[in-house]
Image: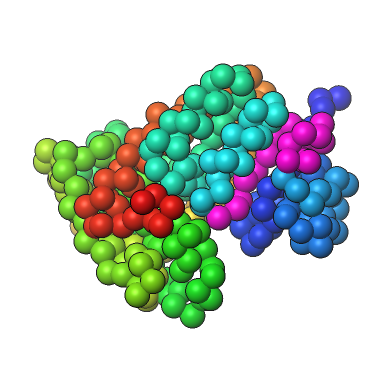
Amino acid sequence: MKSKIKWGIIGPGNIAGKFASDLELFDDAEIAAVASRTLEKAQKFADQYNIKNVFDSYDKLFESNTADIVYIATPHNFHKDLAIRAMQSGKHVLCEKPLGINKSEVQELVEVARQNKVFLMEGLWSRFNPSINKVKGLVDEGVIGKVSYIHADFAFYAMDRGMDSRLLNPNLASGSILDIGIYPIFLAYLLLGKPKQISASSNFHPNGTELQTSMIFQYEKAQAILYSGLTSTSEMKAEISGSKGEVFINPRWHEADSYTLVKNEESQLIDLPKQGNGFVYEIEEVHKCLGAKKLQSELWSHQNSLDLAELLDTVREKAGVKFPFEI
C-alpha cells in the first residue's frame, strides 16, 4: 500500500483551517503535525483535525520526523525565515502567498530549496482553479482573439480590524497589495506576461499602511487595469476582452466556480463547481510533484514566483509603499 504524504501545519489560523479541511479529502494525505508559538492554539487545532503531533515551537516540528512537507500560513513577514528553517531541516515546503515580502527574499528561498534539494512552491491557489485554468486555455487558443484589455479587482472592508492585525499592522507587512492585490497582478501576468511599464497610486492609513491601490499594466498592445483595497468591497468579476469576444470570471473570480464566454453576441455560462474550499487543486499539484520527485511545479514554478515578486516590488515602488523593517 502506498504510504501517505505527511503534512505539518505551521501557523494554525483561519486559512490553515480551510486548507486542513481540504487535506482531509485526500486518501493519500495525513495531517500529521501542527505547530504554533503557543501550545494552546496548536492543541486546539490538533483536536479539531485529529492531529497526533503537537508542537509549541516551529523549530521543534521542523527538527522532528513527523512531517514530509509543511504548509506555512503565518503572516507574510515570517514566510521567508520559517520556509528556510523548514527546508534546511529537509522538509518540503508549500508557503502561502506571497512567498516572500520582496524579490530578494524569494531569490533566497529558491536558492535554499536548490541547495537542500527539497520541493518549494508558493501557495497561489488561484493558479490551480479549474475556471481560471480553462480561461487561460481559451486565451492561449485564441478563442476570444487577441486580448487587449483585462480588468481585475479584489477589495473588502477591513477598517474594522484591530490595529495589530496582519492587514493593518505595518510591522506584519500590512496593506492590500501583498495580501489581495497579488491576485489581480497574478491574473494579468498569467494571461499577458510581464508588462513593459507599470503605473500605480495608493492611499494610506495614518500609520503608514497602504489601504487602496490602483494599477495600470502597459503592454505592447494591451492594458490591464487592476485594483486592490481594504476600504470597501468590490464586485470581484474579472474581465478579459479580446478582438473576437470576452470572458468573465465570475465573482469572486480568484476562487471562481464558473465563467462566462461572450462571443458573436451570444453569452454562455460554464459552471465548474470547485471541490472543498478551493485548496484541493493546489494540493493535487503538490502531491503530483512529490510523487514524480519534482522540486518545483511546472504550473507555478520558481521563476513564476520570482516574476510575481518583481511585479509586486515595482507596484510598491511606484506607489511609495514601504514597510518599517525594510528601511
Which of the 4 quarters of the picture holds residue 211?
bottom left
Apparent side of residue 168 relative to residue 321 in the rendered image (left or right): right
Residue 139 visible (yes or no): no
Residue 127 picture location, percent across and down: 46, 42
Residue drawn at point x = 48 percent, y = 55 percent: 255
Apparent side of residue 111 relative to residue 40 in the rendered image (left or right): left
Point out the residue furthest to the left here.
221
In the image, 5 versus 76, the foreground residue is 76
Residue drawn at point x = 81 percent, y = 62 percent: 40
The N terminus: image quadrant: top right
Q: Which residues are magenta?
A: 59-75
Point out the residue furthest to the front here.
327
Point out the residue furthest to the bottom here.
160
74 in magenta: yes
Apparent side of residue 295 relative to residue 234 in the rendered image (left or right): right
Q: Is residue 164 above or below residue 177?
A: below
Residue 17 picture location, percent across and down: 69, 57
Apparent side of residue 49 relative to residue 111 in the rendered image (left or right): right
Rendered image coloring scheme: rainbow
Number of residue marks? 0
Residue 161 picture location, percent across and down: 51, 76
Q: Is residue 164 above or below residue 311?
A: below
Residue 236 picture location, percent across and down: 37, 64
227 in magenta: no
In the image, 231 versus 100, the foreground residue is 100
Residue drawn at point x = 79 percent, y = 52 percent: 56
Residue 33 visible (yes or no): yes
Residue drawn at point x = 53 percent, y = 41 percent: 80
In the image, 79 versus 94, the foreground residue is 79
